[in-house]
Image (spheres, grey):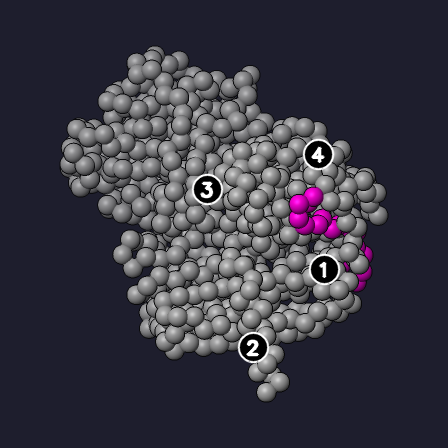
Amino acid sequence: MEQNVVFAAILLLVAAVSSSSNIINPDLLYPYGKNLDYSSPNSDDGDSPLMKLDVILPLYGNNYSSLYVNYNGLISFKSPDDDFTPEKLPLVSGNPFLAPFWADVDISYAGDIFYNQRTDKQVLSRATSDIRTYFGSMDFTAQWVFTATWDRVSYYGSTSDKVNTFQVVLCTDKVQTFVMFNYANITWTTGVGSGGNSKTGLEGVPALAGLDSGEVTGYFIIPGSLNSSIVNISTTTNVDVVGRWAFKVDQLHPGFPLIRTVTTTPAETTTTTPETTTTPAETTTAIADTTTTPAETTTTTPETTTTPAETTTAIADTTTTPAETTTTTPETTTTPAETTTAIADTTTTPAETTTTTLETTTTPAETTTAIADTTTTPAETTTTTLETTTTPAETATAIADTTTTTPETTTATEETTSLETTTTVETASPEPTTTSEQTTTSQATITFPLTTSEQATTSRTTTPQRTLFPTTSAHSMIDLLYPYGPQWDNVSPKIDDGGPPAIRLNIKLPVFGSTYSTFYLSNNGHVSSKDFMQYTPEKFPLPKKIFMITPYWSDVDNRISGDIYYRQSTDPALLSRATSDINSYFHGMNFTASWVFVATWKDVPFFGSTSTKVNNFQLVLISNGNVTFTLYNYVDLQWTTGTISGGDKATGLGGTPALAGLNSGSSSSYYQMPGSLTSDILLISSKSNVHIPGRWAFKIDKIFAEDINGILNC
C-alpha cells in the first residue's frame, strides 16, 4: 500500500513537469556543484577572475599557467572574452580558447556556472579511463583535471524557460592535453542581442562549438556551428558517447579520436536498461516513473530538481506505448564522489520495433530507428550498414538528415580565356572566409570512435566490412566545399572535352608510388598524368598506363554554362583546414599539409543538354611532399550522362553513367566508388566514407590507395 502511494506521488510529480523531453546519459557529466566548485556571480557577459593553474598546461603548442572562464561558453587562456555573438574560426586574435558552446549566456536570468581544478583520485581515474578509451593512449595518466559546467543557463533577452546544460573537461599529464565537451541538454542557440527570438532562443547567429589556437592555423569547428542544427549537438558525438566530443589539444593542430561504426541487432521488442549513478556526499535518490500513454502517443516528461547542498538531479521518465509494451526500471548504482544524479529515459515503442536510447524517433507502420550510421529495421529483418539509402516511403530516422542550399558563389563571366602554360601558386591574397555558406536543418552526423568498452544501450557488434555512411540528404551540416571562385582561381577554358594546359606543380607530388611535377585537369571531371579527354567513362582499371583521380568522370560541356575553377595554394588558413580534415579522418598520422590543389566544377551541364540540370562537385588534393590525400566533395548531382554516351538530352540520365574512383595506372591497383557506371552514382552525394555526407577521403601516395578503413579492395 505504502509503495502504491509513493508510486502515485511519483506519477503526479512527473506529470507536473515540462513536456519538453531530455535524454541525459547518466555518465556524461563529471561531478560539479557548489560544494565542489567555484561559482560565477549571476550577471550577463561576465568572466571568472584569473585562475592560476596548479600545472603548466600544454595547449596549442604553447604552455599556459592560467585561464578565464567566460560566461558566454568559452575558456580563454590569455585574456577574458566577453563577446556574446560567435564568429567563424579562425579568429587570429592571439587569445587561444576552447568553445564548448559560444553563445549569449545570461545567468542573471537563470542558471549557474561552476568551475574548479581537480586532482582527487576518482576524477583523475575517470579522465584517464575516458581518454585511453577514445584515443588508444595507453601511456596517458591524468595528473590534473579542470571542469567548467554551465548548469541550466538561459540566454540574453529570454522570455521562456529554455535552458542549456553543458560542460568542459580539460585534463593533462603535463605532456599530453585532452579536452571533452559534454552536452547534457541544449534547447536554445541564440540570444536576442545576436538576433535570436526571445521566446525560442533560436534564429539569428546561432552558437559555435570548437577549438581556436588564436592563430591563423590550428582550429576546428564542430559540425552544425553557426547553424540552426547546433541545437542538436547533444545528440551527436565523435567518441561513441552521445553528447560528448573529445580532442587532443596540446599541439597546434587538434588531434581526433579513432572512428568505428556500431550496429544494433533487433530481436522482436528490445528495451534498454540505462544505469543511474548516484554519488554520495550530498546524495540524492534517483527516481524514475512509468507512464502509460494512449495509442500512437509517446509522452516524455523530464524534471530537474535541486536537492539540499546544491545536489543536481536530472529526472527523466520511462514511457511505454500499447501493444506488447515492456516497462524497464533503471538501475541505481552508488559510486563515490559528488553529486550529479541523472536518470536516463527509456522509451518502449509499439510491437515489432526496436528501441534504442538517445534520440530515438519512431514512425508509423514499418518503423526504423537509426543511431550512428546504423539502420535498425522492424523485427525479423536484417540490419545493414553498407550502401543503405533512405527513401520516402517507410520513412527512416537517419543520421545527418540535413537539407542544404546550393553554395552562393560568384560565377566568372562566360567567355573563353586563354590560360598560361604554367600555374602559379596564390599566396599573396588570403583565402576567403567562406565561399559556400550552406544552410542546414535537422540532426547532426553522429560519429563513433574506436573504444575498448561498450556502452550500456543496445547490443552492438563492430563490422569488419568497409562501411559507408548513408543519409537522406545530399549535403552535410558543415561547409563542404573548400573556398573557390574567380577572385582566387584560374578558370578552365570553355571548350568541350578540353581543359587547361599541363599544370606545373609547386611540389613534387607523391601519387600511386611515383612522384609528379605536372598533371592535367580535364573538364570531364578528373585529374590525370596524361592529357586524357575521353568523355565516356570506362570501367577501371584502364588498359592505359595513366593515373586518374576521378571525382566524377562524365561528359561535361562548360560551353553551355557553368565554370571549372582550379588553383594551387599554400595559404595558411587553407592549409590549416586541410590539416584538420585529414587528421580527423586518418588518425595517428600527425599530418601537416604544406600544399593544396582545389578544382571545383560549378553548375556544369552535360553535352547535348536541353535542360537546366547541372552538377556541383570538387576535388581537393592535399600533400606534405611525402604523403598525399584527396577529398571528393559532392554538393549537388543532377545528371549522369551526356547524349554521345547514350544519355537523354532532357534528363541527362541513361546510357553509360558517370564513374568516380581512383586509377593508379596499374592493373592491380584501382578503386571504383559505389554506384559508378550505374544510375546510382547520383546517390554518391548523400553518402560518405568519413561520416560527412557528400565527402569521400582517400590516401593516394602509395601504389595501393587507402581510406579510413585501410587499403582499398579493387
Callout 1, which amino acid? Pro
Callout 3, which amino acid? Met
Q: Earlier in the sequence, mark 2 or mark 4?
A: 2
Residues tagged 2 and 1 counted as in contact (Cβ below 8 A): no
Residues tagged 3 and 1 counted as in contact (Cβ below 8 A): no
Inspect this view and state whether residue 548 appears.
no
Residues tagged 3 and 4 counted as in contact (Cβ below 8 A): no
Q: Earlier in the sequence, mark 4 or mark 1?
A: 1
User: Where is residue 325 drawn, in percent x and y?
Assistant: 42, 76
Residue 142 versus residue 335: which sits nearer the camera? 335
Image vertical order of residue 464 relative to residue 236, above or below: below
Task: Specify the segment rendered in magenta.
Answer: 107-125
Query: For mark 2, what is the residue?
Result: 8
Query: For mark 3, what is the residue?
Result: 477
Residues at marks 3 and 4, CA–CA distance in whole angstroms: 27 Å
Callout 2, which amino acid? Ala
Residue 31 image label: 1
Label 2: how many Cα within 10 Å (few below 14, some 14–19, many 20+): few
User: Where is residue 101 drawn, in percent x and y?
Assistant: 61, 43
* Rendered residue at 44%/68% (across/down): 355
Specify whether 590 is left or right of 597.
Answer: right
Q: Quadrant of the N terminus?
A: bottom right
Callout 4, which amino acid? Asp
Q: Judging from the image, what secondary structure is the residue with disc 3 in?
A: loop
Residues at marks 3 and 1, CA–CA distance in whole angstroms: 32 Å
* Rendered residue at 43%/37% (across/down): 439
Q: Of tags 3 and 1, which is closer to the observer?
A: 1
Image vertical order of residue 197 relative to residue 605, above or below: below
